[in-house]
Image (spheres, rainbow, N blue to C red):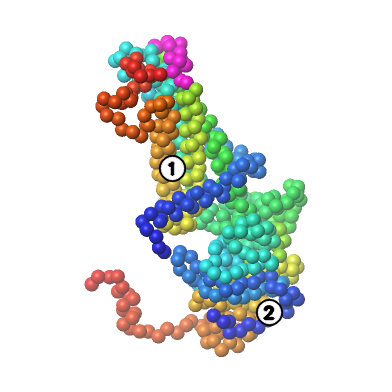
Amino acid sequence: MKPDANAPPGPAPADPRPVLSVRGLSAGYGGRQVLENVDFDVHENEIFAIMGASGSGKTTLLRQMLGLSRPLAGEIELLGERVHPDEREALFRLRRQIGVAFQHGALINSMSVIENIELPLRQHTRLDRATIRIMSRMKLEMMNLLGAEDYMPAELSGGMLKRAGLARAVIMDPRVLFFDEPSAGLDPATADELDNLILGLRDAHNMTIVIVTHALESAARIADRIMIVGDGGVRAIGTLDSLRASDDESIRSLLERRTRRRELDGEAYIERLTADIDA
Amino acid sequence: MSGGPLSTPVAGLGRFGLYLALLAPHLLRPWRQPGAVLRQLHFIGARSVTVIAVAGGFVGMVVALQFHDTLVRFGAVGMLGAAVGLSLIRELAPVLTALIVIGRVGSAMCAEMGIMRSDNQVDALECMAIDPYGYLLAPRFIATLIAVPLLTALFNVVGIGGGWFVGVVMFDISGGAYFGAMADSVLGRDVAMDLVKALVFALVIVWICTGKGFLMHLAARPAFGAEGVSRTTTEAVVAASITVLFADYIISALMLRQPGGKSPWEISGPNSASACSCSRVSPACSTSP
């Protein structure tokens, strides 16, 4: 499926070679194909938002980009390296340069917050204990979580879990950060705080950031480009303004938060309600 | 999806085989995670000591009671130590230790892996370039392979003590006769069988219990959330228990096979020489070595 708008990102990419390149990707799970022939690029130092309705394949796409699931077809290149779950050694080398913040934090629940944040440093560096602790506290301070370092994950609120997950994701100063649903389930003030953190990471640390979200306000505020996923593929890619100017009514509806009009077919409606029910 | 009726179990076996193959290189480098191995040894071994000691003591006592009642009828009560020692070392200690470890530790390991899989914690480790096979699973494998033989030895010692209490303290058999008969009857190969069983059972327990939880999302009926973890844990405990009992028969059959004798899998007729199933502790057995 061809995107109807493929305008350049807000800040013009300095490097023509994309940080992330997806070509002809088809993916699914449990014998069901969710995405077909997906193509897009993410450029250096941009914030790229992937949006779409629930069940549109956003999370499936994220898992593919992280090498957590095997594609049915197509290629993904991240930082110039091929991403494929079967090439574990290469994948682990590549993953040292990226950070991933999961929707619910995905903190290891047998470790305290600070132990979770220290984990990548303890596994991948030879830094001494004190340096690791100071570096971890710097990230916690950045996330406004310094008082929660000895808490266990089960003791944290949803917003704190997300921020702790983000602190862990950026502890190694990754080149690319993936963030799954940064605003989901958060109150507006906390969501706004997270948006500021994401902008700060891009500007202060030169990170390329890919966020998967269905929060339009957040995406409109922080994303340089937005990709809309739906109907098994990419519906559109572009800046918010270019998408709002799209000819496609459904894209404009999604961005204007209008519900899709559904024609009511009475007979089909009754049939759906009474399916599998013996009279 | 296609495939015959065997495709699901074959695929399951394949997944478990691949799981072990991916894990094997990490098992050869136990020094990579000494702290994690020690923590698991504490959880699997040290915290199982009380339940193993209590179970071993009572099993030894009840075995002595049962054998005493039988041996008295044949005037062979002096063989009580041999009967208790052989029963425990060859059979009861490794099997019952394994079943207790499955209930206490195997179920916990399976549930922990299942929850970690369900909550994306395993994916998070992968994304941090931390191999979950080396970080999560290898310490559990190494600790189980060390702890179960030690717990089996503890079961043996306490069980023999329980048998001594019943035989010597309650029934006035002399301590010398009890331990003398045991020392004469228990051979090196009996201790070897005990150790082989303990090691094989340890591998079975940790392989099935961690594997079921870790591969929960790939099961024939994919499991997620609390219901999935609960179902997977039940399946793991049942599968590990049955596999331990099956492996017990196979190891016994292989290690008790007499040189040049019939295969333990052959069914003998009533007149067959190898139909004699009595142990060498019985004076009536003419074929004992």
Tell me: B174 left or right of B47: left
| Res. A156 in view | no
Labels 1 and 2 positioned on one and the same chain? no
Tell me: A54 left or right of A89: left
Q: Indicate the secondary structure of the residue bearing disc 1.
A: helix
Q: Are marks 1 and 2 in contact (CB under 8 Å)?
A: no
Magenta span covers which residues?
A: B172-187
Residue drawn at point x = 68 percent, y = 79 percent: A9
> Which quadrant of the figure has residue A225?
bottom right
Q: As shown in the figure, which amino acid type bears the numbered disc 1?
A: Ala
Q: Indicate the secondary structure of the residue bearing disc 2.
A: loop
Q: Position of residue A103 (x, y in %)?
A: 57, 64
Q: Residues within 10 Å of mark 1 (few under 14, many from 20)?
A: many
Residue at the outermost front position: B260
- For the C terminus of chain B, the quadrant is top left
Q: Which residue is mark 1?
A: B240
Q: Chain of mark 1?
A: B
| Res. A3 in view | yes
Tell me: B173 left or right of B135: left
Q: Which residue is mark 2?
A: A9
Residue B273 vs residue B154, the one in the foreground: B273
Q: Position of residue B68 (x, y in %)?
A: 35, 18
**Magenta span includes B182:** yes
The correct choice, above or below, for A44 with respect to A255 in the image is: above
Residue drawn at point x = 28 percent, y = 70 percent: A277
